[in-house]
Image (cartoon, rainbow, N blue to C red):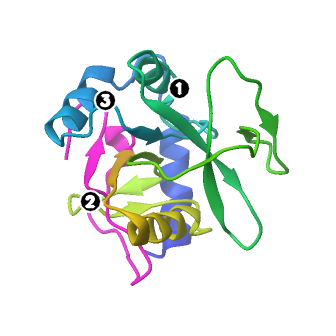
Amino acid sequence: MLKKNLRKKILKIRKKIDPNINKIDFSKIYNLIKRQKKIKKSIGGYFPINNEIDDLEILKKFEEKKYKICLPVVKKNFDMDFYNFSFNEPLIVNKYGIPEPKKTNIIYPDIILIPMVAFDKNLNRLGYGGGYYDRIIEKLMKKKKILKIGLAFSKQKTSNLPISKYDKKMDYIVTEKYIL
């Protein structure tokens, strides 16, 4: 199945999932990170849109545990960077309607929580098709070792995900039911 068709199919499925019932438990992610010895580091998240897994409560708990929190800011040419963020600060809505932090302090996170449209058992991820996360992962991996955690509902899993040489695999995929 083509990526475009698969995206449409999975986004329809995701739209029907009740995010209030299907939440990811913070302790799943925290324990995963502790096992990776990434304690008291920086963590990049995202502002959830289009029925994505809501990671804001998770980020809030990491901030309470004194992690440095950052969110992506979309730039030109399908590029983005992570900038420092605190829940005490206001966000600015970008041209896509996505809230972003002020571009004051760029952060190269040690851990990234990544939204997904679909995923497979081999830790491959399908996004919206712009390649933003593939590019930022590539850029960050040139600077340091990062932990890539994809977040999705278990119903977003597919058996046959078409991938290209530009697609970046996740280190883990966490759903409301299990961790891959």
Does the magenta-highlighted stretch encompass residue 170? yes
The residue wearing badge 1 is 56
| Residue ID at (26%, 21%) | 27
SS state under label 1:
helix
The residue wearing badge 3 is 176
Q: Look at the magenta stretch and give its main secondary structure.
A: loop
Mark 3–mark 1 Cα distance, whole angstroms, equals 15 Å
Inspect this view and state whether residue 18 appears. Answer: no
Relative side of 105 to 118, left or right: right
Mark 2–mark 3 Cα distance, whole angstroms, equals 16 Å
State the quadrant of the N terminus.
bottom left
N-term mark: 3 or 1? 1
Residues shaded magenta: 151-180
Residue 153 or residue 32, whichever sits in front: 32
Using a 10 Å C-alpha cutoff, classify the residue at mark 2 as few (fewer than 14 neighbours), some (14 to 19) or many (20 or more). Answer: some
> Residue 171's x, y, as percent?
25, 55
Q: Amino acid at mark 3?
A: Glu
SS state under label 2:
loop
Using a 10 Å C-alpha cutoff, classify the residue at mark 3 as few (fewer than 14 neighbours), some (14 to 19) or many (20 or more). Answer: some
Relative side of 23 to 11, left or right: left
| Residue ID at (68%, 69%) | 78
N-term mark: 1 or 2? 1
The residue wearing badge 2 is 123
| Residue ID at (63%, 20%) | 87
Rendering quarter of residue 158: bottom left
Rendering quarter of residue 66: top left
CB atoms of marks 3 and 1 within 8 Å:
no
| 166 over 117 or under it: above or below | below
